[in-house]
Image (cartoon, rainbow, N blue to C red):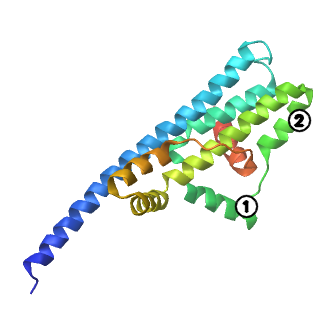
Amino acid sequence: MFSPLFFVYMLITLVGLILFSYLYKQYKKAMLEYYRMGIFELRDELFDYAASGKLSFDDESYQLVRTLLNGYLRYAENLDIYCFLGYQKAIANKKIATVNLFMQKYKKTSKTLNKEQKEKLEKCLRQSALIAVTYMVKKSIFYCIFLTIKAVFCNGISKGINKTAWMCFRREKGETINQNLVTSIYEVGANAS
């Protein structure tokens, strides 16, 4: 038969799994809010730029980027690294036709923009793609587990938990555009509106 100690271990494991599940759900909610905050800040910054008269609200490039940002916000809960990787694999295997709709339209409409306007819009595109990819990675359960284990083993339990929270909420900067991500989010956002 089973010893009483076995049942104690089972109970501790069960409580630990329930606690982890609850904390992971809260973590995902916090990541979602952090992601949305970043996209809202970009959208507001772009709006302020146009409101200052440096770019017309009627400009097609502005409207394309704004539609993209709205798509990022509308479908935030559906963004995850697994779907993104599946989408990338389907593109690589040519199982889906990749019409780079957003980038084609953007390149066509951005020809009328001056250098400052192009830089502003492209900076917004880079930052939005970076925020989305960072969100998808950080939302992953494997990232959460890895980060927690790394922080606890490197810093001890109390410092590790604080370090984990800090690392999860810091913003990372970068300068690359993931065009497939931008295209897919734009297409979904454009079809919804």
In the rendering, at what x and y percent does residue 124 appear? 72, 34
Q: Is residue 110 above or below residue 174?
A: above
Q: Quadrant of the C terminus?
A: top right
Figure quadrant of residue 151: bottom left
In the rendering, at what x and y percent does residue 184 appear? 68, 47
- Specify the amino acid type for callout 2: Lys
Left or right placement of residue 28 versus residue 60 in this view: left
- Judge the density around disc 1: few (<14), some (14-19), many (≥20) Cα neighbours within 10 Å: some
Left or right placement of residue 155 versus residue 10 in this view: right
- Specify the amino acid type for callout 1: Ile
**Picture residue at 68% right of the left edge, 36% below the top:** 68
- Judge the density around disc 2: few (<14), some (14-19), many (≥20) Cα neighbours within 10 Å: few
**Picture residue at 11% right of the left edge, 83% below the top:** 2
Q: Is residue 7 above or below residue 1?
A: above
Q: Earlier in the sequence, mark 2 or mark 1?
A: 1
In the rendering, at what x and y percent does residue 47 appear? 68, 20
Query: Do the CB atoms of the residues marked 2 and 1 lie less than 8 Å apart?
Result: no
Badge number at residue 91: 1
Give the secondary structure at mark 2: helix
User: Distance between the Cα atoms at labels 2 and 1?
Assistant: 23 Å
Front residue of this view, candidates 168 and 67: 168
In the rendering, at what x and y percent does residue 75 appear? 55, 41
Badge number at residue 108: 2
Left or right placement of residue 187 versus residue 13 in this view: right
Q: Quadrant of the N terminus?
A: bottom left
Give the secondary structure at mark 1: helix
**Picture residue at 13% right of the left edge, 71% below the top:** 8
Residue found at the far bottom of this picture: 1
Badge number at residue 40: none
